[in-house]
């Protein structure tokens, strides 16, 4: 599967006239100097690009990526870096249902006490949280889906359900960062107890993580 990235670029004013350079699949270039003609051509091109992207994504195979790692290991950063040039994806987490029930925002989730409360609540309500997660993935399954799951036994269940119901074998990814702060979440202690498809070492610089993310994107996402 290949995700085609289509775009066009508008240059700055050149010698008092507007100049637009169009870059597309054939890599040909067209230059217009009339402003009205330029706007009309740009609108037509934009519509064609949107239509091409829509048709392409309808025919694209579904990819599901399961992300895991301890708190603050860099999972979200890795996803952002890997999808920087990809048009749209859906993201879900096993903890979403619990956060909604406890009215926890991303900002308040950063404290050790709140993380522990979320983890404890998830343990008690794992079946409801899992059903909510899988239903959301099934209903919102686009071409690319990232799912955060912490417990290895839940990852195993999710992978099996995806294979049986969605006919897709998820890619499992573990992000490792040795300097992570202990957030008091007991689920963090088990993240390594699974054989992942991809192990990401995030003990270097942001640029090094970016290189790993690009390698992952090129191998698995495009």
Image (tube, rainbow, N blue to C red):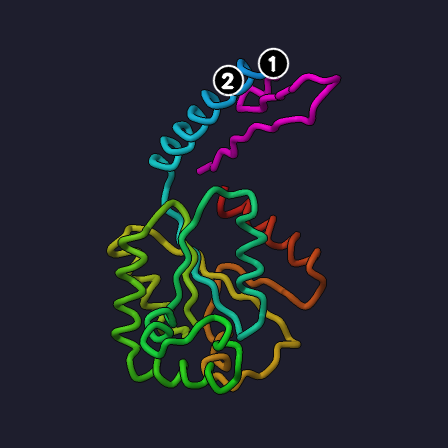
How many badges with numbers are in the image? 2
Query: What secondary structure do most residues of the magenta stretch adopt?
Result: loop
Pick whichever, 215 or 20, lies toward us: 20
* Magenta-drawn stretch contains 119: no
- Mark 2 or 1 closer to N-term? 1
User: The N terminus is located in which quarter?
Assistant: top left
Occupied quadrant, residue 135: bottom left
- Answer above or below: position of 62 versus 165: above
Which region is colored magenta? Answer: 1-30
> Whole-percent x and y of residue 155?
38, 68
User: Which numbered dot is residue 32?
Assistant: 1
> Whole-percent x and y of residue 144?
41, 48
Do the residues bearing badges 2 and 1 touch, measured as CB atoms within 8 Å? yes
Which residue does the image show at 61% across and 17% down from the upper left?
29
Tell me if 9 is positioned left or right of 185 in this view.
right
User: Which numbered dot is residue 41?
Assistant: 2
Q: Residues within 10 Å of mark 1 (few under 14, many from 20)?
A: some
Pick whichever, 159 or 67, lies toward us: 67
* Magenta-drawn stretch contains 23: yes
**Could you say whether the residue bearing mark 1 is in a helix, strand or loop?**
loop
> Whole-percent x and y of residue 150?
43, 73
Which residue does the image show at 35% across and 35% down from the upper left?
59
Tell me if 127 is positioned left or right of 116 in this view.
left
Occupied quadrant, residue 55: top left
Q: Residues within 10 Å of mark 2 (few under 14, many from 20)?
A: some
Tell me if 166 is positioned left or right of 145 in this view.
left
């Amino acid at each position: 599967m290949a995700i085609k990235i289509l775009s066009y670029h508008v240059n700055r004013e050149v010698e008092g006239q507007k100049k637009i350079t169009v870059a597309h699949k054939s890599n040909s270039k067209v230059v217009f100097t009339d402003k009205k003609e330029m706007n009309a051509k740009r609108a037509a091109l934009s519509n064609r690009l949107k239509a091409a992207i829509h048709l392409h994504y309808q025919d694209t195979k579904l990819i599901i990526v399961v992300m895991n790692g301890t708190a603050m290991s860099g999972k979200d950063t890795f996803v952002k870096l890997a999808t920087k040039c990809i048009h749209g994806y859906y993201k879900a987490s096993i903890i979403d249902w619990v956060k909604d029930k406890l009215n926890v925002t991303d900002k308040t989730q950063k404290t050790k006490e709140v993380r522990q409360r979320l983890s404890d609540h998830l343990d008690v309500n794992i079946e409801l949280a899992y059903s909510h997660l899988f239903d959301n993935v099934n209903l919102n399954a686009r071409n690319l889906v990232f799912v955060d799951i912490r417990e290895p036994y839940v990852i195993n269940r999710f992978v099996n359900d995806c294979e049986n119901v969605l006919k897709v074998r998820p890619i499992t990814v573990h992000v490792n960062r040795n300097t992570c702060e202990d957030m008091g979440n007991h689920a963090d202690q088990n993240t390594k107890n699974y054989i992942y498809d991809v192990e990401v070492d995030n003990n270097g610089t942001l640029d090094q993580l970016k290189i790993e993310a690009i390698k992952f994107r090129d191998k698995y996402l495009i």
